[in-house]
Image (spheres, helix red, strand yellow):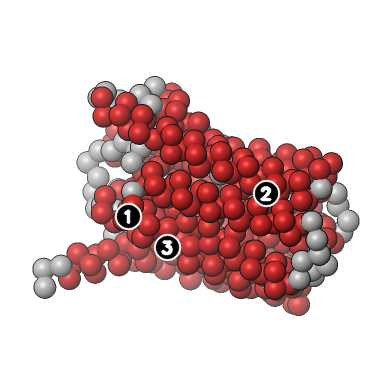
Amino acid sequence: MTNLPVEASSLRKFGLLASLYAAQGLPFGFFTQALPVFMRQQNYSLRWIGLTSLLALPWALKWTWAPLVDRYHSARWGRRRSWLLPLQALSVATLVLLAVTGEHGGLPLLLLGCFVTNAMAATQDVATDGLAVEVLTDRERGIGNGIQVAGYRLGMIVGGGVLLIVFEQRGWTPTLGLMAGLLALCSVPIWLHREKTNATSSASGSRGLSSWLRRSGSARWLLVLGVFKTGDALATAMMKPYLVDSGLSMADVGWLIGSIGSITGLLGALAGGVGSSRWGTRRALLVFGLLSAASVGGYALAAFGTPTFTQLALLSGFEHFAGGMATVALFTEMMSHCRRGSEGNDYTVQASIVVLATGAAHSLSGFVAEPLGYASHFGLCAVIAAGGALTSWWLLPSIHALRRGTAEA
């Protein structure tokens, strides 16, 4: 009986975090999935499609304002709710405005809406990540990160799959109006949540990027963060154009990614949480990273021929499942590199490095794929992804040893 309150408390934490990450996945999933398909159907080149990833620049730059999110808040609303509630409301208002005016603006307004929602979601992510590090115990972090990634992918299932199909069948206004309503629904748990007072919060914000970089082992950990997801990112940026060039329609891509790929990604995130908790993050990073590399290699083999829809569905499911597991392992390890009182900043610094590396890979993907062709491009990506997994296995013990051997900054 004594374990019941703990279990109930954990479930409340997981539900809260799942709703917050789902709220980020909804618009991000729609824009990232809809833009490549929409632009390819409008005969834009692979290079231009790859460059649209620059619209996610706020995710890479959020570390610059992360200390402010850690430091400033309303005592009445709570340290994290002070940011999350207004940002959720502004995101809903932005989507409503796009729903009303967007159909007449075409691609330029779609690009602007993508950038604005990325800016708000990136800031929200700082507060959400800080909240996650604060509320999850060491024992809960593996499962908690699985729930977080699953929640995010659930948002992307709806945003990048279901809403993509609605967009093709019903148009701009109903799609974005529905997204605004779903985002408002995701805001209910954080509205009902009551934060505990954090005694260290007053010192937050004084620890910026430079102090985090001066910690022992940071250079090696930066290398792991920079290379672990790069190969996968270089590949996934070209997967949607590849599907279109393979003869799939927007609805086909929506069903493939939204129903099969994203659901298996959600299951992979949950499996990754269990695996990270049972095996430890070092082993999880190696195994899940190599599986992710193998899934990209599968696309290389498929691109040599003319794959059927069933074959593409199996590939998409495998790639999303392995990617979900690898992402959870990386996020779980990132939490152990956060200092008390500076959780939002420290996690954001690490996440921004990952975004910078993957964003650069996304931007360059079209320039690599166009001269090489899809098969050679995916093959190169698989080799890079495997190298990232092996790098993490090799460097992690020395990073932990350096952290243990010196006092925290």
- Answer whether residue 340 is visible to the viewer in this image: yes
Q: CA distance from mark 1 to mark 3?
A: 10 Å
Q: Earlier in the sequence, mark 2 or mark 1?
A: 2
The image position of residue 234, as x and y in percent, is 67, 45
Q: CA distance from mark 2 to mark 3?
A: 23 Å
The local crowd at label 2, few if under 14, some if 14 to 19, many if 20 or more residues have their Cα within 10 Å, is many
Given the image, on which type of amino acid does mark 1 rest? Ser
The residue located at (30%, 48%) in the rendering is 134
The image position of residue 73, as x and y in percent, is 36, 44
Given the image, on which type of amino acid does mark 3 rest? Ala
Residue 235's label in the rendered image is 2
Disc 2 on helix, strand or loop? helix
The residue lying furthest to the right in this view is 43
- Answer whether residue 350 is visible to the viewer in this image: no
Residue 277's label in the rendered image is 1
Mark 2 and 3 residues: CB-CB less than 8 Å, in contact?
Answer: no
Relative to 124, residue 92 above or below: below
Frontmost residue, 351 versus 180: 351
Task: Say whether residue 397 is left or right of residue 106.
Answer: left
Task: Say whether residue 12 is left or right of residue 367.
Answer: left
Q: Earlier in the sequence, mark 2 or mark 3?
A: 2
Disc 1 on helix, strand or loop? helix
Task: Say whether residue 12 is left or right of residue 179.
Answer: left
Image quarter for residue 4?
Answer: bottom left
Residue 271's label in the rendered image is 3
